[in-house]
Image: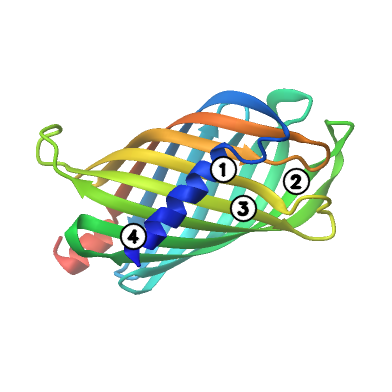
C-alpha cells in the first residue's frame, strides 16, 4: 500500500510538470521565502503565525490559533491578509482578506517515514479587476486545498547531530462559488525539499513547480520556484513554568 501511494504521488508530481502539453505553456522563474512559527500556550493550544513572500506573485501574513485534541491531529483557524500581483503588473497591488481553517493529520511510520495529510479552507475576498487592473470593490470565492506530504529521515555526515530529511509534497487547490468561471482548478503545487531540524528550528530548501491553468484560453502558466522555508516552535513562559521545561 505504501509503495502504491508513493507511485501515485510521483505520477501526480510528474503530471503537473508536463500537464496539458498540447496547450501553450509560459514558464516563469521565482523565489519563495517563508517563515512559520508556533508558540505553545497549553499542551493543546498554540498561536500560529506565518509570513511568505513569493517574487512576482504574492505576500501573505497569516495568523491563527491551533488546537490539538489528539497527538497526531491539529485544527488551526484564523485570518490572513495578502498583496497580490495582477495580470498587467508584477507589483503587489491587489489586496486580499482571507479567513481560513485547516485540519492536519500526521502519521509516523516505520524506518523514519512520516505521512501528512492537510485539508485547508480559504474564504477569499479579493479586490476586483477591470481589464487586468485593480478597481473598486471585492469579489468572493471559496477555495479548498488538499496537501499530501511524505517525509523520510536520512543519515548524512553533515550538520552535526541535526535531523536530516527529504520531503516530497503535492497540493491541489480548487475554487468554488458563483464568481468562479471556467476552470475550478486554481493551481497544483508539487515540491521536493531537503530539510534540517535542530532545536526549535527546521530549515527546508528545495524546488516547487506550480501549475496554473487558464481561466479562459489555452495558456498554462508554469512556475519554477526555489523555496526556502523556516519553521520555529516556541513555548510561552507560563507553559514552561507549568510543565517544568
Label 2, on which residue? 126
Label 3, on which residue? 173
Label 1, on which residue? 16
Q: Is residue 41 visible?
A: no
State the image coordinates of residue 196 (x, y, percent, origin top left): 24, 40
Residue 218's image quarter? top right
| Mark closer to the observer (4, 3) | 4
Real-space CA distance between mark 1 and mark 4, rounded to the nearest whole angstrom? 20 Å
State the image coordinates of residue 25 (x, y, percent, origin top left): 68, 29
Q: Earlier in the sequence, mark 4 or mark 2?
A: 4
Q: Secondary structure at mark 1?
A: helix
Q: Residue at x 28, y 40 (%)?
A: 195
| Mark closer to the observer (1, 2) | 1
| Mark closer to the observer (1, 4) | 4
Real-space CA distance between mark 3 and mark 2, rounded to the nearest whole angstrom? 16 Å
Label 4, on which residue? 3
Q: Earlier in the sequence, mark 1 or mark 3?
A: 1
Tags 1 and 4 touching, CB below 8 Å: no
Q: Earlier in the sequence, mark 1 or mark 2?
A: 1
Q: Secondary structure at mark 2?
A: strand
Q: Earlier in the sequence, mark 1 or mark 4?
A: 4
Q: Is residue 171 visible?
A: yes
Q: Secondary structure at mark 3?
A: strand
60 over 237 or under it: above or below = above
| Mark closer to the observer (3, 2) | 3
Q: Earlier in the sequence, mark 3 or mark 2?
A: 2
Q: Secondary structure at mark 4?
A: helix
Real-space CA distance between mark 1 and mark 2, rounded to the nearest whole angstrom? 26 Å
Q: Residue at x 31, y 68 (%)?
A: 42
Q: Quadrant of the C terminus?
A: bottom left
State the image coordinates of residue 57 (x, y, percent, origin top left): 62, 32
Tags 4 and 3 touching, CB below 8 Å: no
Amino acid at each position: 500500500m505504501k509503495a502504491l501511494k508513493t507511485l501515485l504521488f510521483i505520477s501526480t508530481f510528474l503530471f503537473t510538470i508536463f500537464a496539458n502539453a498540447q496547450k501553450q505553456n509560459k514558464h516563469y522563474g521565482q523565489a519563495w521565502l517563508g517563515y512559520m512559527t508556533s508558540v505553545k500556550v497549553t499542551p493543546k493550544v498554540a498561536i500560529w503565525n506565518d509570513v511568505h513572500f513569493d517574487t512576482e506573485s504574492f505576500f501573505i501574513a497569516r495568523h491563527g490559533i491551533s488546537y490539538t485534541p489528539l497527538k497526531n491531529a491539529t485544527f488551526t483557524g484564523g485570518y490572513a491578509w495578502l498583496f497580490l500581483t495582477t495580470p498587467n503588473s508584477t507589483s503587489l497591488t491587489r489586496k486580499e482578506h482571507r479567513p481560513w481553517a485547516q485540519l492536519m493529520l500526521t502519521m509516523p511510520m516505520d524506518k523514519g517515514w512520516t505521512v501528512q495529510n492537510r485539508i485547508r479552507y480559504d474564504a477569499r475576498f479579493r479586490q476586483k479587476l477591470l481589464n487586468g487592473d485593480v478597481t473598486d470593490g471585492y469579489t468572493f470565492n471559496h477555495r479548498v486545498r488538499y496537501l499530501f506530504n511524505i517525509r523520510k529521515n536520512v543519515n548524512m555526515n553533515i550538520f552535526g547531530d541535526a535531523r536530516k530529511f527529504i520531503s516530497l509534497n503535492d497540493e491541489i487547490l480548487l475554487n468554488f462559488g458563483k464568481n468562479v468561471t471556467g476552470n475550478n482548478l486554481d493551481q497544483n503545487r508539487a515540491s521536493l525539499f531537503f530539510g534540517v531540524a535542530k532545536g526549535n528550528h527546521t530549515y527546508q530548501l528545495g524546488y516547487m513547480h506550480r501549475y496554473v491553468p487558464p481561466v479562459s484560453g489555452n495558456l498554462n502558466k508554469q512556475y519554477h520556484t526555489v523555496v526556502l522555508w523556516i519553521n520555529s516552535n516556541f513555548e510561552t513562559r507560563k507553559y514552561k513554568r507549568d510543565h517544568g521545561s
